[in-house]
């Protein structure tokens, strides 16, 4: 396909199709040629039918006169013989038998021998057939559909009589190939840094590593820049990017510049037409923006840092625009945080930096237009509190994974988060302490998933979720990654689990000063701590009444 498109392997020749249309030369395309041919064929059928009808009516008229003459044969012969001239005979036939001039002339043109030799039955049979023909021809002139069927039948007859196999083959034109036809639909990891640098990297470049490891370098960021967003997608997906100002931009994944795991990528302003003052805060990937059924049955649900929730039909985002569109009306002092793709029947969990979370049914949020503000999804615990994540859940077997900024994480059964009314303060999901740091991420996961964590210094670690046991909702959890100095976790994403073992795993662990899969504080400070710290809190189920929208 690429050879057809890029080289002279296939050559196309243009046709200058000029024809006379109503006496004037015109350049016609294939559709015009067919239309004018059908119009001409229709005119031929009408004119031919009118001619055949006139001939049939003329013949029937004469036969009608002959039948009258046969009914009065002796009187007709006597009148003809007694007439002095042919004109007298013609006048006598018209006046005596009520014949027309044409009928009288037809009788007089026949010799008496022929006239007496006419067979009444044959004339009656011919007259009856002519009447049927006249009726059929009149029906053709009265019914356009019948005329079109005649054209079709005549073309089929010509095809059956003269048609043979094609000398050439009709194939799909290489010119009709879309760009994605030349690009392998492989899995990729898209990363966006805090300063707005974007790249895509083959998923195969990332490797599974044991929990607690130091990880491998995932990106060489500049100065204080760090990886802020991780997107797992495939090359043929569509990506919708949502800015903190509530605007949406489109991009095909294969259009994102490719870079190695250690490259910094390109400024996102050079990839999509995003204003310099706006920053990407959320994203979704969709399969196909041309499938109307898919668009009608899916929704985008959004959440802001101040706890506002909004749901919009995916169809509202099916027409990409270079300059983007407004996805949500953002109030002053607020900004968009998250956007998820749902089927309209999901359960929503919104988590706060203070360690609380609320669970409610998506059906309690009605669909709104793109310019709407939304409704209240959760009430913040205090003035400095904010939403750190939102997840939509369809799989009842999913567990909830939360991660703190200092590297602690845990899995909890979904049922530990009871369904409440939208707009409340929710329940405690993490026992936030100085040791754990604030809550920074919440994900829904199963044993089939992997967890990808990137810290602000650019270190990436990928671990299997199955290594994390299910724990209580208000515990501190276990250490997922060892952090050096003041380093903190910047972003967390779940990826499909890969059952592979690194050939150089031992070398990496030794280079990082680790002797096993699971690391403890002893590796950094010499003081070993328990792997799991289940610290319960008496007020974990404390909840306030939902606030009004």
Image (tube, rainbow, N blue to C red):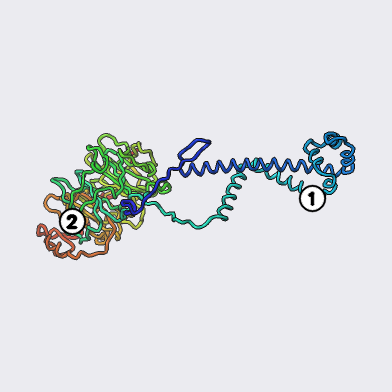
142 lies left or right of 200: right
Front residue of 350/70: it is 70
Residue 55 seen in the current view: yes
Residue at 81% across, 38% down? 104
Label 2 or label 1, whichever lies nearer to me, is: 1
374 lies left or right of 471: right
Quarter of the picture holding the C terminus: top left
Q: Are marks 2 and 1 in contact (CB under 8 Å)?
A: no
Q: Which numbered disc flags the more N-terminal residue, 2 or 1? A: 1
Q: Position of residue 298 (x, y in %)?
A: 39, 47
In the displayed structure, 326 sits above or below 487; it is: above
Residue 522 seen in the current view: no
- The residues bearing labels 2 and 1 have C-alpha atoms spaced at a distance of 109 Å
Quarter of the picture holding the N terminus: bottom left
The residue where tag 2 is placed is 481
Q: Position of residue 167 (x, y in %)?
A: 46, 56
Q: Position of residue 63 (x, y in %)?
A: 78, 43
220 lies left or right of 281: left
Q: Secondary structure at mark 1?
A: helix
Front residue of 253/378: it is 253
> Which image quadrant is residue 217 in?
bottom left
Q: Secondary structure at mark 2?
A: loop
Indicate which disc residue 498 carries. Answer: none
The residue furthest left is: 526
Q: Position of residue 382 (x, y in %)?
A: 23, 41
Indicate which disc residue 122 carries. Answer: 1
Circle 1: is it few (<14), some (14-19), or many (20+) Cα within 10 Å? few
> How many numbered circles are shown?
2
Circle 2: is it few (<14), some (14-19), or many (20+) Cα within 10 Å? many
Front residue of 123/134: it is 123
């Amino acid at each position: 396909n690429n050879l057809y498109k890029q080289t002279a392997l296939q050559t196309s020749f243009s046709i200058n199709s000029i024809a006379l249309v109503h006496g004037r030369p015109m350049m016609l395309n294939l559709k015009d040629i067919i239309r004018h041919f059908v119009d001409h064929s229709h005119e031929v059928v009408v004119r031919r039918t009118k001619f055949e009808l006139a001939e049939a009516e003329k013949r029937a008229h004469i036969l009608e006169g002959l039948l009258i003459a046969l009914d009065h044969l002796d009187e007709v012969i006597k009148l003809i013989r007694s007439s002095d001239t042919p004109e007298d005979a013609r006048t006598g036939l018209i006046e005596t038998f009520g014949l027309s001039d044409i009928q009288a002339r037809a009788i007089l043109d026949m010799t008496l021998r022929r006239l007496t030799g006419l067979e009444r039955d044959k004339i009656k049979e011919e007259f009856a057939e002519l009447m049927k023909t006249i009726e059929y021809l009149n029906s053709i002139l009265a019914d356009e559909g019948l005329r079109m069927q005649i054209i079709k039948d005549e073309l089929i007859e010509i095809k059956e009589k003269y048609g043979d196999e094609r000398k050439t083959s009709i194939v799909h034109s290489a010119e009709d190939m879309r760009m994605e036809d030349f690009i392998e639909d492989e899995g990729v990891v898209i990363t966006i840094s805090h300063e707005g640098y974007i790249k895509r990297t083959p998923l195969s470049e990332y490797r599974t590593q044991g929990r607690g490891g130091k990880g491998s370098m995932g990106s060489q960021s500049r100065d204080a820049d760090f990886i802020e967003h991780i997107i797992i997608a495939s090359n043929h997906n569509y990506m919708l990017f949502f800015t903190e100002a509530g605007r949406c931009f489109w991009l095909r994944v294969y259009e994102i510049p490719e870079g190695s795991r250690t490259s910094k990528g390109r400024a996102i302003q050079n990839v999509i037409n995003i204003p310099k003052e706006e920053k990407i805060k959320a994203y979704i990937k969709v399969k196909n923006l041309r499938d109307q059924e898919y668009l009608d049955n899916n929704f985008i649900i959004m959440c802001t840092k101040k706890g506002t929730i909004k749901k919009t039909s995916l169809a509202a985002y099916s027409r990409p625009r270079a300059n983007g569109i407004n996805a949500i009306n953002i109030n002053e002092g607020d900004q968009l945080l998250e956007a998820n793709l749902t089927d309209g029947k999901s359960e929503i969990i919104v988590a706060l930096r203070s360690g609380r979370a609320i669970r409610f049914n998506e059906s309690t949020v009605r669909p709104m237009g793109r310019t709407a503000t939304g409704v209240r999804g959760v009430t913040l615990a205090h003035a400095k509190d904010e939403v750190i994540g939102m997840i939509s859940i369809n799989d009842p077997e999913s567990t909830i994974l939360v991660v703190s900024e200092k590297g602690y994480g845990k899995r909890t059964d979904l049922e530990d988060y009871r369904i409440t009314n939208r707009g409340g303060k929710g329940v405690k999901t993490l026992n936030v302490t100085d040791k754990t740091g604030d809550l920074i991420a919440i994900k829904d996961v199963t044993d089939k998933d992997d967890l990808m964590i990137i810290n602000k210094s650019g270190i990436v670690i990928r671990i299997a979720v199955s290594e994390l046991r299910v724990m209580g909702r208000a515990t501190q959890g276990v250490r997922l990654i060892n952090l050096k100095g003041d380093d903190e976790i910047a972003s967390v994403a779940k990826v499909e689990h890969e059952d592979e073992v690194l050939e150089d795993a031992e070398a990496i662990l030794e280079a990082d000063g680790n002797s096993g899969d699971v690391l403890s504080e002893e590796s950094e400070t010499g003081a070993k701590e328990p792997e799991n710290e289940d610290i319960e809190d008496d007020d974990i189920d404390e909840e306030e009444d939902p606030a009004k929208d």
